[in-house]
Image: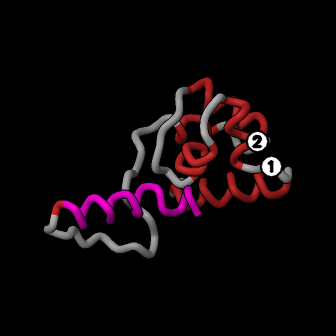
Amino acid sequence: MDFRKITEELLEAKRKMRLTFADLGKIISRDEVWVAALFYGQASASYEEADKIVSKLGVNNDITDKLTRCPLKGFVKGLGTDILSDPLVYRFYEIMKVYGMPMK
């Protein structure tokens, strides 16, 4: 399954259950931005953390394994893949790509 579909499924389940990222973060003792990063594939969880989130949301158990895989840091639809050469500008760009959607 494409990770974008997993993201959509997780976000839809979260919306239907009227939960926030902060609510889910409390379940696993993590910050809400980290939970959002997990949903967007920018972070990976331990099996226990992923299982708690998947169980709470009532989504397909196959997603548990996907949430424990190596993250896709920086791959966000719409931000492109150009790598800037100035180190300072590149780091700001990297921060935006990794944490932009979770912070939004």
Q: How would you rate the neighbour count of disc 1 (Cα within 10 Å): few for under 14, some for 14-19, many for 20 or more?
A: some
Residue at position x 49%, y 50% in the image: 41
Q: Are marks 2 and 1 in contact (CB under 8 Å)?
A: yes
Q: Secondary structure at mark 2?
A: helix
Segment colored magenta: 88-104
List the single residue furthest toward the front.
88
Q: Position of residue 76 (x, y in %)?
A: 44, 65
**Magenta part mainly helix, strand or loop?**
helix
Q: Is residue 52 left or right of residue 43?
A: right
Q: Is residue 20 left or right of residue 42?
A: right
Q: How would you rate the neighbour count of disc 2 (Cα within 10 Å): few for under 14, some for 14-19, many for 20 or more?
A: some
Residue at position x 68%, y 52% in the image: 10
As for residue 12 lying within the magenta part, the answer is: no
List the single residue furthest toward the top.
48
Q: Is residue 96 left or right of residue 45?
A: left
Residue hosting label 1:
19
As for residue 100 lying within the magenta part, the answer is: yes
Amino acid carrying mark 1 in the image: Leu
Image quarter of residue 61:
top right
Residue at position x 17%, y 61% in the image: 87
Residue hosting label 2:
23
Q: Position of residue 27 (x, y in %)?
A: 73, 31
Instruction: Give the Cα separation between the discs numbered 2 and 1.
Output: 6 Å
Along the viewing direction, whichever of 30 and 73 lies nearer the viewer: 30
Q: Secondary structure at mark 1?
A: loop
